């Protein structure tokens, strides 16, 4: 049994550090209704004489505090879209807006700051440094942001408590199970208190029970902290745990629905 919320620190779950934390700087306005917008977005890959169209005219709006899943078959463009929404890649045409700001207007330094401070990423492959400790893996984003050592350690310990891994501070990912590594990856994604979590197949490499625990954690985070969460998944059961499901096929959104409401959004 995984006790993801065993004695979670009240300072993490119930208090929003973005309001009072002097270390948090937010260069992007939070006055907009939509946290994420995609406007007529296309993405093409040029492979010699061949052109592969991964996304074709994507239009999408995600409200602040919404919990959204993106579903589609392999090769449908869902992970490509997530990368664009997270400013990890640039569209061939169209615009991506984060809190009303067109991120194509940001330079490399501003994009890096946006990703580090506003967005938390969770990947199917965990993307942990295998030979480094959990402490160092989690502390790196906070170090980049400029938190002092004491604050970094406080956040690391608090988050490991939240995900039920308080005793794994000095373990190395290569010695941990897949479920444990994914929980470390989630804790790392939360270290800078992001407003947005983007998760690409976060349950893909874990068993069904651990997957349910991970999704329950995301739901709790969304409800209690108002974090905007976007999850890419191929699992209908995972998608049913979100507020809205966006279906992608052949690089296009072809349907949306709200679980439990019996119809399209």
Image (tube, grey):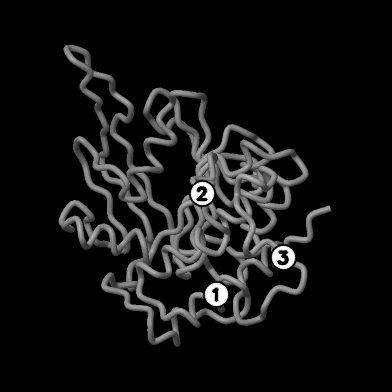
**Left or right placement of residue 69 versus residue 205 in this view:** left
Residue at the outermost top position: 49
Task: Check if mark 2's residue and mark 1's residue have beta carbons within 8 Å.
Answer: no
Depicted 239 relative to depicted 217: above or below? above
Mark 1 or 3, nearer chain start: 1
Task: Check if mark 2's residue and mark 3's residue have beta carbons within 8 Å.
Answer: no
Residue 2 placement (x, y as % from top left):
79, 55
Q: Which residue is mark 3?
A: 167
Mark 2 or 1, nearer chain start: 2
Instruction: Identify the element where label 2 is drawn.
Output: loop
Mark 2 or 3, nearer chain start: 2
Residue at the outermost right position: 1
How crowded pointer 2 is (Cα within 10 Å; few <14, some 14-19, many 20+) is rated as: many
> Which residue is at 56% across, 79% downward?
154
Tag in front: 1 or 3: 3
Quadrant of the image occupied by residue 124:
top right
User: Mark 2 and mark 3: span between their CA atoms?
Assistant: 18 Å
Depicted 105 relative to depicted 202: above or below? below
In this view, the residue in front, 167 or 18, is: 167
Q: Which residue is mark 1?
A: 155
> Which residue is at 72% across, 47% downward?
212
Residue 220 placement (x, y as % from top left):
66, 64
Q: Which residue is mark 2?
A: 128
How crowded pointer 1 is (Cα within 10 Å; few <14, some 14-19, many 20+) is rated as: many
Which numbered tag is attached to residue 141? none
**Left or right placement of residue 58 versus residue 176 in this view:** left
Quadrant of the image occupied by residue 33:
bottom left
């Amino acid at each position: 049994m995984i006790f993801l919320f065993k004695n979670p620190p009240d300072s993490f779950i119930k208090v929003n550090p973005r309001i009072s934390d002097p270390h948090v700087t937010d260069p992007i306005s939070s006055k907009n209704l939509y946290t994420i917008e995609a406007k007529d977005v296309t993405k093409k890959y040029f492979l010699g004489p061949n052109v592969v169209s991964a996304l074709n005219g994507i239009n999408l709006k995600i409200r602040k505090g919404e919990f959204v899943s993106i579903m589609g078959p392999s090769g449908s463009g869902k992970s490509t879209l997530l990368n664009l929404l997270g400013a990890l890649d640039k569209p061939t045409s169209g615009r991506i807006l984060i809190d009303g700001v067109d991120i194509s207007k940001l330079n490399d330094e501003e994009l890096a700051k946006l990703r580090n401070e506003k967005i938390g990423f969770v990947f199917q492959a965990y993307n942990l440094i295998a030979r480094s400790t959990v402490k160092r893996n989690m502390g790196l984003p906070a170090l980049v942001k400029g938190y002092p050592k004491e604050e970094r350690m406080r956040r690391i310990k608090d988050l490991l408590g939240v995900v039920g891994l308080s005793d794994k501070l000095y373990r190395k990912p290569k010695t941990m199970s897949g479920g444990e590594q994914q929980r470390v990856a989630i804790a790392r994604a939360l270290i800078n208190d992001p407003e947005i979590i983007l998760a690409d197949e976060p349950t893909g490499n874990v068993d069904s029970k651990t997957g349910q625990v991970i999704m329950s954690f995301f739901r709790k985070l969304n409800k209690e902290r108002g974090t905007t969460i976007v999850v890419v998944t191929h699992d209908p059961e995972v998608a049913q745990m979100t507020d809205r499901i966006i279906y992608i096929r052949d690089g296009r959104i072809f349907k949306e629905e709200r679980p439990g409401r019996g119809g399209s959004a």
